Amino acid sequence: MSTLSPDFAMATVAGVHGQRLEAFRAKEAARFEAARPRSRAALDAGAAPWLNGVPMHWMRDWPSPFPLVVKTAKGARLTDLDGHRLDDFCLGDTGSMFGHAPPAVARAIRRQARRGLTYMLPSKAALRAGALMSAHFGDFIWQMTLSATDANRNALRVARAITGRRKVLVFNGCYHGTLEDTMVELHAGQTVARAGLVGQGFDLVEGAVCVEFNDLEGVAAALSKGDVAAILTEPVMTNSCMVLPQPGFLDGLRALADAHGALLIIDETHTQSTRHGGYTGQHGLAPDIFVIGKCVAGGMPTALWGMTDAVAKRFQTYDAARPSGHSGMGTTLAGNPMQFACLEATLSEVATPEAFDHMNTGAARLAEGLRAAIAQAGLPWHVVRVGARVEFICAPGPLLNGSQAAAAHHPALEGAVHLGLLNRGCLIAPFHNMMLVSPVTTDRQIDRLIAAFTAVITELNGAIHA
C-alpha cells in the first residue's frame, strides 16, 4: 500500500511528478529487498544488541529498506553479503577517498601492528609525518586527534584562549562534524540552536553567531561587536547541497578577520578533494589554523589541526602563564603510532599529485556525463564539482548560501535516485548526492554510473508528464 499523501501524489518535486516518484521508489525498494536475503537474515540475527539495529546511528540514514551488510571493500569496489559488487562512489563519505585499503596503508598497518598499537609517545613515523603534513598543506605547527570534530574543538579552544573572546562565527548550514559550538542556524535572521539536537545542555547562542555564506557584509556586522574569537569555515559548503564561494569571499574573510582581531580557521575535511594541498593550497588561502581529517591517513581514524607560527607562539605564551591543571584538550588514543604509520604511508605513497590528477580527470568526466543526462531529461537540476567531489543538485544553480542549499534539498527524490543507482550497481553518499572519484576509480566505473543515473532519471521523468 502506498504511503503517498494525495497532495504529494499530485505535486511535482524538482521536475518529477510525485506519483511517478512514489511508484519508482516502491519498485526499487522491493527490488533491493528481493536481491538481499542474506543481508536481511544477518541483520535479523545480529542487530538486536545495537540501538535501532546499527552500531552507529548514521548507518540508518541510507534510503534503502535496510542497510547493506558489507563483506569486503577494496579499491573503488564494495561487495555486500549477497555477493553484489558495487562501484563505490561514496567511499565512506570521504573517509576512504583514496580507495579502500590502499596497499601502502595496508602494509603500514601490518608493520606497525607488530610494534604496538598505542603507547602515548611519538614514533619515528610521527616525526617524519609532521614534515610531510607541512609539505602537503603548508607550514603549520601540528597536533593530532582522532576526528575532525575534535580537531575543530581544539582549534576553537586555542582561538578563545589567545583572543580572550567567547564566540565563533560560523555559516548557516555549515559542517564541522558534531562540534556543539557550531550547531546553530539562522531563523528569521537570528542565530538559534539547530532544530533536533539531542540532549542539548546549554545555550549555544552564547558562544556562536551564524551568518549566511558569501555574505561579507553580514560577517563584518557580526565581527564589529568585538566578541568573536574566530571565523570557522569550509572553503566550500558541503553539508547539504554544495555551495561554492563567490569571487573574493574567502579573501574577504581573511581581511575582515585581521581587521577585527579574529582568527580564520579553515576546515578542509571535505574539500581536500580539490587537489594536492587541498582547496587552501590550490587557491592560496592563508588561514591562521588549518583543520583536516577523514581520509588524510587513508581511512585510519585521524585528523590534524595546524597553527601558523605566529598563532603557535601566542598559544605557547598563554599556555605558559595559565594555572596548572587539566587543559580540557586531548584524548588517550590520539596520536597513536598506528595513525602515524598510516598518515606517513598516505602522504608519501597514496595522496600524490599524480593521484589527484587522475581523480580530477575522472571527476570532470563524471560531471560532464551527469550534466548531459540532466539536460537530455530537461530537468531543472545542476551539477557542482570541487576536484574529485561531484554532486548533482535537484534544483537550478548556482546556490549562494545555506538557506538556498536547504531549499534545494529534496530528500524523497534524492533517496529514490540513490536507491535506483544502488540497484544498478552504483553506491553514492546517502546524505547529499555526493560522489567521489578515487585514484583507483576507472573510466568504466564512471561510465557505468553515468549510464545508471541516465536510466534512473529517464524513468523518473517518463510519461507521467503527458
Image (tube, grey):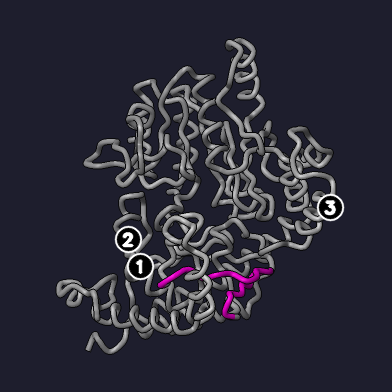
Determine which residue is flagged by label 1.
394
Say which quarter of the image contains residue 259: top left
| Identity, as a three-letter code, of the amino acid under mark 2 | Ala
SS assignment at label 3: helix
Mark 2, other Cα within 10 Å: few <14 / some 14–19 / many ≥20: some
Q: CA distance from mark 1 to mark 3?
A: 46 Å
Magenta region: which residues?
Answer: 65-82
Q: How far across and how far down the image is residue 346, in percent?
A: 73, 53
Q: Tell me which numbered mark, 1 or 3, is placed earlier along the sequence.
A: 3
Nearest-to-viewer mark from 2 and 3: 3
SS assignment at label 2: loop
Are the two marked residues, 1 and 2, in contact with CB atoms closer than 8 angstroms? yes
Residue drawn where x is 46% and y is 25% of the image: 229
Q: How far across and how far down the image is residue 406, in percent?
A: 32, 55
Q: Which mark is residue 111?
A: 3
Mark 3, other Cα within 10 Å: few <14 / some 14–19 / many ≥20: few
306 over 399 or under it: above or below: above
Residue drawn where x is 33% and y is 61% of the image: 409
- Which part of the image, by quadrant, shows the C terminus? bottom left
Nearest-to-viewer mark from 1 and 3: 3
SS assignment at label 1: loop
Say which quarter of the image contains residue 288: top right
**Which of 78 and 311 lies nearest the eye of the viewer?**
78
| Identity, as a three-letter code, of the amino acid under mark 3 | Arg
| Identity, as a three-letter code, of the amino acid under mark 1 | Cys
